[in-house]
Amino acid sequence: MAETIFSKIIRKEMPADIVYEDDRMLAFRDITPQAPTHILIIPKEEIATANDITPEHDELIGAMVRTAATIAEREGIAGDGYRLVINCNGHGGQAVHHLHLHLLGGRPMTWPPG
Ligand code: AMP
């Protein structure tokens, strides 16, 4: 897949407000937050879209979701609730083709999404 800006953030060639990092993933605040808390959890492995997730990624994706829940707790939004979103391709509104999990919270979310 073509490299994205997220690869530069992973390599620390591009600044980001990083809130969590381990050997498999990185989490940082979205540069254009859509809610009081808006954090992106990304795998260090370059996976372009949700369509590119394979069974080998099952543990990684599960760990990303658990990390999101841990960060939500740290951010103080776990009790009130939050939303986890993965946008995929054009109709899903995906702008950056490096898989990422949006953690959104700090205000009530509407449903259905626009
Ligand atoms: P998506 O539309 O699901 O692909 O979301 C991409 C997200 O990445 C958007 O919410 C952007 O605001 C965010 N984003 C793009 N560039 C950066 C950056 N350099 N640092 C933090 N967030 C970014």
Image (tube, rainbow, N blue to C red):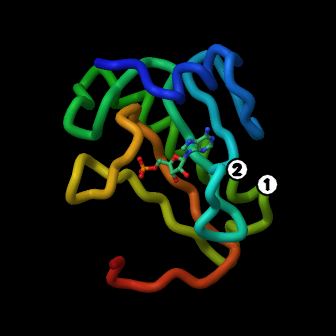
Which residue is pictured at 57% across the width and 27% down the height? 25
Spot occupied by residue 43 in the image (x, y as percentages of width and height): 49, 28
Label at residue 47: none
Spot occupied by residue 83 in the image (x, y as percentages of width and height): 51, 66
Q: Quadrant of residue 106?
A: bottom right
Compared to residue 110, the image places residue 76 above or below, namely above
Q: Are marks 2 and 1 in contact (CB under 8 Å)?
A: yes
Label at residue 74: 1
Compared to residue 99, the image places residue 7 above or below, namely above
Which of the pair 69/100 is nearer the observer? 100
Amino acid type for the residue under numbered disc 1: Arg
Side (left or right) of 70 relative to 76: left
Compared to residue 47, the image places residue 70 above or below, namely below
Give the CA distance from mark 2 to mark 1: 5 Å
Element marked by disc 2: helix
Element marked by disc 1: helix
Which of the pair 60/28 is nearer the observer? 28
Which residue is pictured at 77% across the width and 40% down the height? 17
Q: How busy is the neighbourhood of tag 2: few (under 14 within 10 Å), some, or many (20 plus)?
A: some
Which of the pair 38/72 is nearer the observer? 38
Which residue is pictured at 64% across the width and 38% down the height? 27
Which of the pair 29/70 is nearer the observer? 29
Amino acid type for the residue under numbered disc 2: Ile
Q: Quadrant of residue 2?
A: top left
Does the beta carbon of the residue at mark 2 sit less than 8 Å from ligand 1? no
Q: Which residue is mark 2?
A: 71
Q: Quadrant of the N terminus?
A: top left
Compared to residue 17, the image places residue 110 above or below, namely below
Q: How busy is the neighbourhood of tag 1: few (under 14 within 10 Å), some, or many (20 plus)?
A: few
Q: How many marks?
A: 2
Which residue is pictured at 40% across the width and 32% down the height? 98
Q: Quadrant of the C terminus?
A: bottom left
